[in-house]
Every structure is written in structure tokens, then in C-alpha cells.
């Protein structure tokens, strides 16, 4: 039995072995099935194996098919396609990372889009991407905010102006997140929890307390 035929097996362990086998011995005939399964696979470990298997195939075959998934109404399909595109790292996918995906209503999709955007952004467009990302500071819970901070930090100095502008936002939760991210930009080794607490302190003290 060909490995891809086992990707629909009810047992996750069987699907995992099939995905690993498809990546170990790449075959262009596998790509369509791997992409289709990537969009619907319920098990996290199998999804990761599918992503790995797709990275083992030619980007000319995988990237267009994964880009096609970005318009799926299924959040998991969009998220996994973005994740896989970030791992493939082919910048031909960059135009498909739209503002709509970067601001997707589903937090997991948005987080995957942020990671993909940082991985694929062309040289010279980092500041523009930072402005799009910084517009979402304050969004979601801790994990979502941490993901956004990490994405901005990965853009380096290009993210500085956008983050500093957000630190003046009238909404306290946006200011706190922006200040924490700015702290991490200056001190990459600082922990996110410490940066958040420091940002809370600065916001509570008000503008005068943040001077110096």
C-alpha cells in the first residue's frame, strides 16, 4: 500500500507513519493528497509530519497548492497552510499573505499568518509589515499577544517606530502590550511576563511615571 493511501486511516499512529514515509521518499504524486490531508488532519503530530513531508517536495509543486488553501472557509486549513508555507520559506508565497489573513478573526490563523509573514517578508518591506502587525497590539490572550510580540521582535529595528507609536494608544491594554514589546526589542533576553508587568507599572503611573 502506498503511504498516502494510509493518510486516511482511522489510527493516528498509522497516519503519522504514512506522512513520515511520504517525506522520507518524496514523490510528486503524493503532493495533492498531502496538501488535502494537511487541510483536514485533526491530530497535531500528524499535521506536523505532513508539513515536514511537504517541505521535502519541490516548492514549485507545493506552494501553489498551499496558497490555494488560504481562501478556505475552514480555519484549520488556513492555519496549517500558513504554517507549512513558513516552513518551506519560498518568498513567492509572500503576495498571498494578505492583510485579511494577518488580521484573521481566528487567533490561530492570525498567529500562523504572523509567523509566515516574518519568514517570507521581502527585504525592504519589514517596516510596512511591522505597521500592519502593530495595529493588532493588545489583541487576544497571553499566547496570542506573545506570538505577536515575537513576530515584531523578529523584524528587529524595523518594528521600532510602529511599536513606539502604539505605545501612545489611548487604550491601556494596547499601551501595555506595546510597551512590553518595546522592552523586549531593547532587551531580547528579558522574559515576556516581566516585560508585561513592567508595562503595567508604567501605564499605571501614567506618562510622567514613564519618563526617564
Image: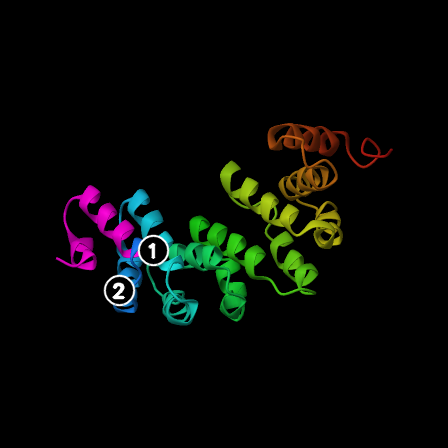
Image quadrant containing the C terminus: top right
Left/right placement of residue 132 relative to residue 58 reads right
Front in this rendered view, residue 52 or 211:
52
Q: Is residue 79 visible?
A: yes
Q: Mark 1 and mark 2: span between their CA atoms? A: 9 Å
Q: Is residue 141 visible?
A: no
Chief secondary structure of the magenta portion = helix
Image-quadrant location for residue 211: top right
Name the spot of residue 87 as percent of width and height, x first.
Answer: 46, 55
Image quadrant containing the N terminus: bottom left
Residue at 36%, 69% in the rendered image: 65
Residues tagged 1 and 2 counted as in contact (Cβ below 8 A): yes
Dot 1: within a 10 Å radius of its alpha carbon, few (fewer than 14), some, or many (20 or more) residues? many
Left/right placement of residue 55 relative to residue 192 reads left
Residue at 38%, 58% in the rendered image: 56
Please give the residue where the numbered disc 1 appears in the rendered image: 53
Q: How many marks?
A: 2
Disc 2 on helix, strand or loop?
Answer: helix
Indicate whether residue 149 is drawn in magenta: no
The answer to whether residue 63 is above or below residue 1 is below
- Magenta stretch: give its range: 1-23
Q: Which mark is residue 77?
A: none
Front in this rendered view, residue 24 or 55:
24
Q: Earlier in the sequence, mark 1 or mark 2?
A: 2
Left/right placement of residue 170 relative to residue 113 reads right
Please give the residue where the numbered disc 2 appears in the rendered image: 30
Amino acid at each position: 500500500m502506498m503511504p498516502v493511501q494510509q493518510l486516511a486511516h482511522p489510527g493516528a499512529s498509522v497516519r503519522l507513519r504514512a506522512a513520515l514515509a511520504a517525506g522520507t521518499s518524496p514523490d510528486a504524486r503524493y503532493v495533492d493528497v498531502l496538501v488535502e490531508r494537511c487541510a483536514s488532519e485533526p491530530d497535531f503530530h500528524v499535521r506536523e509530519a505532513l508539513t515536514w513531508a511537504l517541505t521535502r517536495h519541490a516548492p514549485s509543486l507545493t506552494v501553489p497548492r498551499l496558497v490555494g488553501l488560504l481562501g478556505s472557509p475552514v480555519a484549520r486549513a488556513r492555519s496549517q497552510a500558513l504554517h507549512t508555507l513558513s516552513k518551506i520559506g519560498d518568498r513567492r508565497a509572500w503576495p498571498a499573505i494578505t492583510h485579511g489573513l494577518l488580521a484573521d478573526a481566528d487567533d490561530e490563523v492570525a498567529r500562523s499568518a504572523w509567523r509566515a509573514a516574518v519568514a517570507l517578508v521581502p527585504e525592504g518591506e519589514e517596516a510596512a509589515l511591522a505597521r500592519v502587525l502593530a495595529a493588532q497590539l493588545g489583541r487576544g490572550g497571553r499566547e496570542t499577544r506573545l506570538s505577536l510580540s515575537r513576530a515584531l521582535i523578529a523584524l528587529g529595528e524595523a518594528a521600532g517606530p510602529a511599536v513606539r507609536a502604539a505605545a501612545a494608544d489611548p487604550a491601556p491594554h494596547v499601551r501595555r502590550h506595546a510597551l512590553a514589546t518595546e522592552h523586549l526589542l531593547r532587551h531580547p533576553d528579558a522574559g515576556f511576563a516581566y516585560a508585561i508587568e513592567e508595562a503595567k507599572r508604567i501605564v499605571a503611573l501614567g506618562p510622567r511615571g514613564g519618563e526617564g
